[in-house]
Amino acid sequence: ILGDDKESVLKALQHGELATGNIVENFTRAFGSYIGKKYGVATCNGTAALHLALRALDVKGNDEVILPSFVCNSVLNAVKYCNANPSPVDINPDDYNISLEDTKRSLIGSTKAIIVPHMFGKPVRNLEDFIALDVPVIEDCALSVGASHDGKKVGSFGDLSIFSFRATKMLAAGLGGMVLTDDEHLYERLKDLTAYDNRQHAGESYNYQMSDLNAALALSQLKKLEGFVWARKIIANHYTGMFKKSAVDFEFPNVDGDNIFFRYIIRHPRRDEFIENVRSRGVDVAKPVFMPLHRYLNLN
């Protein structure tokens, strides 16, 4: 957070619009243009964005939603908000992204959506094959804002895409999220779902708006996002260079290609012992996912 970020928020405070105003609209347009989607709705966080995306697709009770088991619990929460049935599938062992083959095996008649997260900054490599399954795809870009697949930004491929701007994310707005789409009908549905007051009917709606203060910080950060991506790649190369010179007993990621390294993920045969050892030296390391979803759901 640099001086220009602080100045942007200060100007928003001086403008006097603290809730949802012109700055949110400006950020929504700018971010949609950056990703390559026509329509967007800014939200208070990424979980809210995912909930809205699911409801825009009319996901409800008894519908099946496919999602990877190795993902943040908030993704599961958004499915639960819809009273739908989560169907967790396995991941690829090399990139930690959702398995296409296991997704195909899990498709049933009541499958209403597939949530495809780009995990830890690594884009899903066979994204087009997921879209070809003829089931609505929601790209979860919460951990990969700024990454590209086949020359296009992640989030530009699915029927809907969702993003998180939490303080720890690639683009940090304190709190905030976004859902994007090219489908005008889905966009109108998203707008209706977030119109929480002054409505002609008393239907379903959610007070999920982003504030102008968060949007002001997000707009400032967006201008520097490509620099953030570049810096993370440099740091990842630095880590890998050091590890290759030492007698390491863990697997580390490939720094080549499209990985923007939201997290630098390694695999260690004695994980918990390794974490305790490194933390004792003043370096914070942790499991990238606290607990896989199939364990929350008592599936084994």
Image: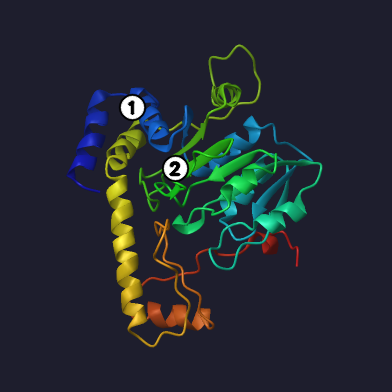
Task: Report x, y in % for residue 128.
Answer: 59, 45
Relative to 71, residue 271 above or below: below
Q: For the residue marked with disc 2, what is the amino acid?
A: Lys
Q: Is residue 105 left or right of residue 75?
A: right
Viewer-nearest residue: 295 or 119: 119
Q: Secondary structure at mark 1?
A: helix
The disc placed on residue 160 is none
> N-terminal of the two: label 1 or label 2?
1
Report the residue that reaches farthest toward the left: 3
Viewer-proximal residue among 258 and 11: 258
Q: Quadrant of residue 255?
A: bottom left
Quarter assignment of residue 222: top left
Q: Is 180 drawn above or below residue 73 in the view shown? A: above
User: How far, Cα to Cα, is label 1 from label 2?
Assistant: 26 Å
Which numbered circle lies on residue 23?
1
Q: Amino acid at mark 1?
A: Ile
Which quadrant is the C terminus positioned in? Answer: bottom right
Q: From the top left corner, tell me how far across and down residue 4 is, in percent.
A: 19, 41
Residue furthest out toward the bottom: 247
Residue 152's mark?
2
Using the image, determine if residue 133 lies above or below residue 33.
below
Tell us which disc is closer to us: 1 or 2.
2
Depth check, front residue: 177 or 246: 246
Element type at marker 2?
Answer: strand
Provide residue 172's location: percent of width, then percent of height: 35, 46
